[in-house]
Image (cartoon, grey):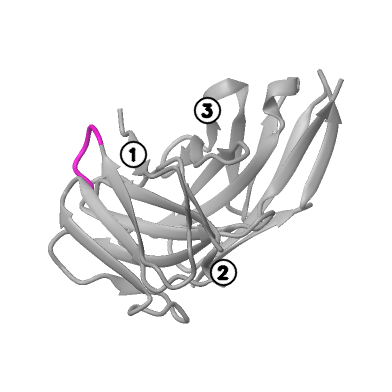
Amino acid sequence: AQSVTQLGSHVSVSEGALVLLRCNYSSSVPPYLFWYVQYPNQGLQLLLKYTTGATLVKGINGFEAEFKKSETSFHLTKPSAHMSDAAEYFCAVSGYNQGGKLIFGQGTELSVKP
Amino acid sequence: GAVVSQHPSWVICKSGTSVKIECRSLDFQATTMFWYRQFPKQSLMLMATSNEGSKATYEQGVEKDKFLINHASLTLSTLTVTSAHPEDSSFYICSGHRGREETQYFGPGTRLLVL
């Protein structure tokens, strides 16, 4: 069985500040981990993913995430927030031989203050 | 690459009518397509998984006779909401999966409002 927990349904940062969105997972198989972003009234866009190999993964728009197996975490970070980063962020988990099926976290809404 | 489109982007219909939503993978063959429902300020809820040429697999609690899914080709899946009622109003999102990789590629969503 797999599950995802995103800590904090809403995070607010100032423009230029560090962005940290937390994601913890549980999985009975080696996990594949994803971060997606959703802007209002739109679908989901892939930010980054971890499957195997390097545990620090870089994605689009300056985001990165680190897979920490010992902590069962996959937190998303960005050194300096931009106003355009304001959106809903979803962490998701899948795994080998899962047929691509994703289990999503509850989502975190990121607000960026000027 | 890996673009998924949905049509229509929004639809308003009267209670009791049926609505069809199309999901197309534009530049890849999607061996599997997924259909999700999303309520305001909530996460995505998986409704069903469809594989080309076979019957869809529905998640627990999703009425298969209410939400008809057809995956006629490797680039097209349709969701038909039959005899729609106001409680079916929601944002419906599809995604395509290529099978040989792990990533789902999402469509832009369809907002359904049933009056």
Residue B104 placed where, x, y %? 38, 46
Which stretch did the figure color magenta?
Answer: B26-30
In the rendered view, tell whether residue A65 sits above or below residue A9.
Answer: above
SS type, badge 3: loop
Query: In percent of the image, x 42 and y 38: which residue is there?
Result: A53
The reply to whether residue A30 is visible in this rendering is no
Label 1 chain ID: B
Q: Are marks 1 and 2 in contact (CB under 8 Å)?
A: no
Residue A43 rendering spot, x and y as whole percentages: 50, 42
Residue B91 placement, left or right of B74: right
- Name the mark nearer the viewer: 1 or 3: 1
In the rendered image, the quadrant that contains the C terminus of chain A is top right
Q: CA distance from mark 1 to mark 3?
A: 20 Å
Secondary structure state at the residue bearing disc 2: helix
Which kind of residue does numbered mark 1 sit on? Val
Q: Quadrant of residue A95?
A: bottom left
Chain letter of disc 3 in the image: A
Please name the residue that numbered disc 3 is placed on.
Answer: A59
For residue A56, side relative to residue A102 (left or right):
right
Residues marked 1 and 2, same chain: yes
* First-in-chain label (1 vs 2): 1
Q: For mark 2, what is the residue? A: B86
Residue drawn at (68%, 27%), measured in percent from left and top? A85
Q: Residue B82, which numbered label? A: none
Tell me the kind of residue under disc 3.
Gly
User: On screen, B47 above or below A57?
Assistant: below
10 Å neighbourhood of mark 2: few (<14), some, or many (≥20)?
some
- Chain of residue at mark 2: B
Between residues A44 and A100, which one lies in front from this camera angle? Answer: A44
Q: Which residue does the numbered mark 1 point to in the structure image? A: B4
Is the residue at mark 3 from the same chain as the one at mark 2?
no
